[in-house]
Image: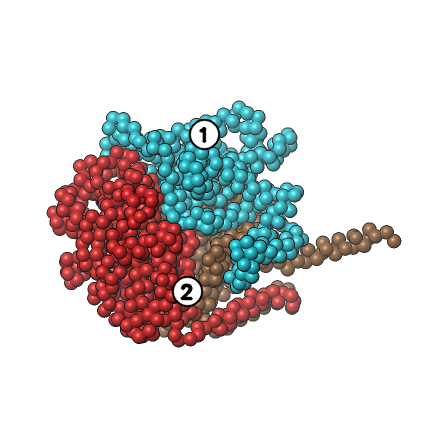
Amino acid sequence: MNTQFWVVQAFNGVSYGALLFLIGSGLSLIFGVMRIVNLSHGSYFMLGGYVALSVIWTTGSWVLSIPVAALTIAAVGLVMERLFLRPEGRAKVVRDAVIAVGIALLIQLAVGRILPPLLPGAIGNFIQVTLVVIVFAIPIYFALRRVSAVAIEADMLRQVLMTVGFAFLFQQAALDIWGGNNFDIQPPSALTQSLVIGGIYLPLYRVFMIVTAAVIGLVLWLAMEKTRMGAAVRATVDDAQMARGVGIDTNRISMFIFALGAGMAALGGVIGGAFLGVYPGLDFEMLPLAFAVVIIGGMGSLGGAAIGALAVGLADNFGKALFPELAYFTLYAPMVLILAIKPTGLFGRD
Amino acid sequence: MSKQTIKIAAVVLCLVALAVIVPRGNSFVVLLVTRALAFAILAMSLDILLGFTGLASLGQAAYFGVAAYLTAILANRYGFGLHWDFWLMVPLGMLTGAALAAIFGLFAIRATGTYFLMITLALGQCVWGLAYRWNSMTGGDNGITMKGGRPQFGLDLTNDVTFFYLVFAFFAATLAALYVLVRSPFGKSLLGIRERELRMKILGYNVWLHKYVAFIIAGAFGGLSGVLWAHTNGIITPETVVLTTSVDALLMVVLGGAGTLVGAAIGSAIVFGLREFGSTLVPWWQYVLGAVYVLTILYLPMGLMGVPERLRQWRATQKKRTTKNLASVPS
Amino acid sequence: MTSILRKRLAPVLMGTALAAGLAMAAPAGAEELRIGYLAPLTGGLAQTGIDMRDGFQLYLDEHGGKLGGMDVKFIIEDEQGKGDVAVIKAKKLVLQDKVHMFIGGVLASTGYALAPVSTETKTMYIPSIPAADDLTQRQLKDFPYLIRTSWSSSQPHHPLGQWACDQGYKKITTIAADYAFGYEVVGGFQKTFEDCGGKIIQKIWPPLGTKDFGPFIPTIKADVDAVLSLMVGPMPAQFIKQMRGAGFKKPILGGGTSYDEFVLPFMGDEAIGDVSALHYSAALDTPKNIAFVKAYRAKFGKVPSYYSENNYTTAQWLDEALKKAGGKFPGPEELIKIMVSIKLDAVRGPVSFDDMRNPIQNIYIKKVEKKKMFGYEKDELWNTVIKTYPNVSQFWTYGKEKFLAQPVYNKDFPPCKFCE
């Protein structure tokens, strides 16, 4: 194992860490601001890749697919946050309506297995489905309104399980929409070349991942440190109650951060799609890695996420190269040690 | 009769009914119920942590998985645990679970809330990583198929009905043991810790030690569940210790009602019913599973076991509302 | 009190109703053939399962839903890609649906988990995909009701090793997913390659599911003549891309699943020129295959993979056997006996059984090419057959006794004599 080996391995580890930063930093911010442990964060990563694929298939543009995927999934995150994690006022009504329609759709699927099509043609079928859904959705909606949902804002465990539920829903939906093939995202050919420096091949795409993560990290950092909004976010991370006390709209901040986090994960999914592929199961594969990043770096800290991502990228890379049989163990065991010494992670605050 | 006696009588009655009815069902039902019961032991062990101590662990599958792997490895390599020595395997599995929990507890118990959740997740992932990668020991992704079949010692456990009774007996015994535990002074102080940790500290309780012991006990029963699971399944793969197994166990507890023990078992029955019976009925069963998660969280704060309580509350508010309405009618 | 009792009893009553309902759903009529089919329809392997099901279904649809004149009740169960779920679903199929046989599973571990179920319940089991060598080799004696219509993992890779040697490659590094299937593929290749005079100088085992090959590619020795890869699922596309990106310019050979039609349509042009071996290629230029590809593609919108073909052929084999049995199910032993005697002209070419109930079949050495085929308009990646090894048995040319005397291929067998 010569210098070249170490250089290439370190480079690879850093580039993998760059990808992990994209998914981990959002998770970290969401936790910092809202104290939500979001187990559907891996789903955003996967869905980002799928949406990008759809954009590429229809428009042929990889460049376009990045913002579209990020914005679409940010919107998905926004809706999830507004309706299910932090519903207020009228959002609760909408939530109950959404759930009622969801249940009615499931009932319709079940009924559809027994009930023959009564109306002819595709339109007839559509009318029949709509009618069945409406017939079931209305009573369910009123029942739900009467039951009145529980406030889950203060209950960490309930939030966790809620996001797991969504992860399952997203998984099945992705399978139904995009099928189960192992897709791959092809970046523009300019990015598939390699730099050759001193006989060492450095794939440009990995360089691109590092640069992207660095730029995004820098922009986020500047936004956090230099803008009013950033200051408000930091204040919320430190002490949400106090922040509210001084007139910061923490509600709006959490909405914004959740959407941002989801969008970043989706961005990671697009960029990672050319590197890991896009396929069912990607969500639950990435999730523990994202958590490793956050746990090591400390929740709610951007710098922590960067350090955590680098640490995980390098540990994973060198672990696999040097101790293949213990590969995942070398990833998670240091994590446990860090937590045992400093439960809040390297840069986290209580 | 006190309310408590009635409750116990009702549970016993249900158990007897279960033992009588299930073997009469078709063999698939017997298998399903056996699986749900074996897993219910894990869910109940988690309830000791979540429902009675207030510790939400995301790594409970670790003890379960380690004991299951141990059972499979000992049986395949040394033929251990397939005859009378099955009765040695059971305490051995529990000891392993307890020992592992004793180690993990040293890391985890200090943390609280989310950080406890995180560190148990990390510990669980360590075990998963070993199961997945330590090929020479665990068979890696392929896992281990139990070659010797189920134990035979006078009783022939390869018979699904006999095996059901065995698992059922272990389940009932665990339920009884854990019930006694939570009613004991120790259990009472656990509840105290869940409700008012600081006060317990001031009162001079060693909170850390209480949590630690609860953690170890939960690990032991997780181990028991793992031993039975290995024989229920006949095959152990890293899926056994994957994150979603731990999450499923959590859901079961919350779905049934945390802090009720019986609730964990009901939750286990429902989730298994969905995953394994529901999936024979409809291809989109995962939507139902996801929906059960979301609906449970939103509309069943105390789980299914809490439904009567919730109904009572609801009726009370309704009554209040009607009386208020009546009162506001000008006379 | 009553309300508590009622609540506690409710689940039990529901359970009873359920049990009774299930008991009543007993099968009726003796003329129909009940086939239980186990395929993953959710989770990471879902598309594999769909390909499998579609292959079988296509044959049924083309033959009026009948096999050997019998009406087929085709009961599909989602095994979720998990061995233990497959076992419970198989038992459900046998005990509740009273199926005559069950077919399927994907993973080798699932095959190993299902085979004992067939023995225990005396029900015929066709592992139409699981390729673990020992199912039809050293462990076959434990599974009297098992017959495999697909392949054994090392079967196509014996000829591939020979072929690589014939190309003049002297030193090869293998890089394969670290699990039993990977060991058997690499083992088969290494055996024939080294018997012919080649040297495997390095074996690299990335974990199953690896997509970032960063840690592994730099360790490949510089003086190799070629690399043999064995990848599955989402791994192959990323592997090739990263290999070429890292500047590796020598030939890359692949085990069957590294380039089969399940992954090929989603690969980039980097894959062009790579060579792999399998018992099926969608680019086979035979009338039977062209018809199959066209029918399949028209119906399901994608090129059939070997998962599809193997199950189509399974249905065909059953059809012929049941015809010979006189249009009724003659019992598992008898049906297996009949099947073994049938030589089939299948989509993949002529197939017959050896006396260990694994097919003897053509193995195709295939090269990835970008071209138009069968009148389709677009340029696509196809696995062009460049050499056919006819009638290859799972024992290659070693003979059954000699072959079975060696242990099943694993991480340490054949030993890596030339590894430094």
Residue density around tag 2, few if under 14, some if 14–19, many if 20 or more, within 10 Å: some
User: Which numbered circle lies on residue C75?
Assistant: 2
User: Which numbered circle lies on residue B120?
Assistant: none
- Chain designation of label 1: A
Question: Compared to A98, does A110 lie above or below?
Answer: below
Residue on which the image places disc 1? A216
Identify the chain drawn in red: C
Residue C139 position, x and y percent, is 25, 63
Q: From where the camera sits, is residue C313 visible?
A: yes
| Quadrant in the picture for the N terminus of chain A | top left
Identify the chain drawn in cyan: A
What's under tag 2, amino acid-wise?
Ile
The reply to whether discs 1 and 2 touch (Cβ–Cβ < 8 Å) is no
Residue B127 position, x and y percent, is 38, 49
Identify the chain drawn in brown: B
What's under tag 1, amino acid-wise?
Ile
Residue B313 appears left or right of C128: right
Residue A72 position, x and y percent, is 50, 39
Query: Which residue is at a point 33% across and 38% down the rendered structure image?
Result: A317
Residue furthest toward the top? A226
- The alpha-carbon separation of the residues under discs 1 and 2 comes to 51 Å
